[in-house]
Amino acid sequence: MTEKAWMKAELLKATESLIDMASESELRVLGELIGLQLLKAGFIRQAGALGMTAQQLESCRLDIEEKQRQVMELVRLLDETNANAIQAVTAPKH
């Protein structure tokens, strides 16, 4: 098995485990992260081949940056929610 095939298999197992235990919010953030990475990969691989003008390329780049800001805000909110949940569970009870 090549290293890429092994990494793919490990990622699939990890993703399935995460999906099984994730909350709806976590699944949404995971989906957005994956979508963002696919958008970036597609843009990088296809931009030159599509014969886009410099203006079109810049517009796509700005759209990707905006999507990245939105996804990072979702990640921040999820992290904050998780931190609050951990704090609530571990806080001393009076």
Image (spheres, rainbow, N blue to C red):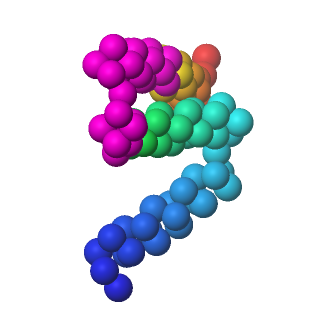
Extreme-bottom residue of the structure: 1
Vertical order, 51 against 59 (above or below): below
Tell me if I can see residue 83 in this picture.
no
Q: Position of residue 53 (x, y in %)?
A: 33, 22
Q: Is residue 17 above or below residue 3?
A: above
Horizontal side, residue 45 vs residue 87: left or right: left
Q: Front-most of 78 and 89?
A: 78
> In the current view of this chain or complex, which residue is farthest to the right?
24
Q: Residue at x 33, y 70 (%)?
A: 4
In the image, residue 77 sits, relative to residue 37, either above or below, namely above
Could you tell me which residue is drawn at 33 percent across and 14 percent down? 55
Q: Which residues are magenta?
A: 43-72
Report the residue at 38% width, 19% height from top: 56
- Residue 4 lies left or right of residue 80; in this view the side is left
Would you place residue 20 above or below residue 72 in this image? below
Residue 36 horizontal/vertical position (percent): 47, 34
Q: Note whether residue 21 is visible.
A: yes
The rendered magenta stretch, by its main secondary structure, is classed as helix
Along the line of sight, which residue is nearer the eye, 1 or 17? 1
Q: Nearer the viewer, residue 14 or 87?
A: 14
Nearest to the observer: residue 74 or residue 85 = 74
Which quadrant would residue 24 be assigned to in this image? top right
Count up the numbered dots. Answer: 0
Quarter of the image with the N terminus is bottom left
| Quadrant including the C terminus | top right
In reply to whether residue 65 is colored magenta, the answer given is: yes
| Residue 41 in picture, x, y percent from top left | 38, 43
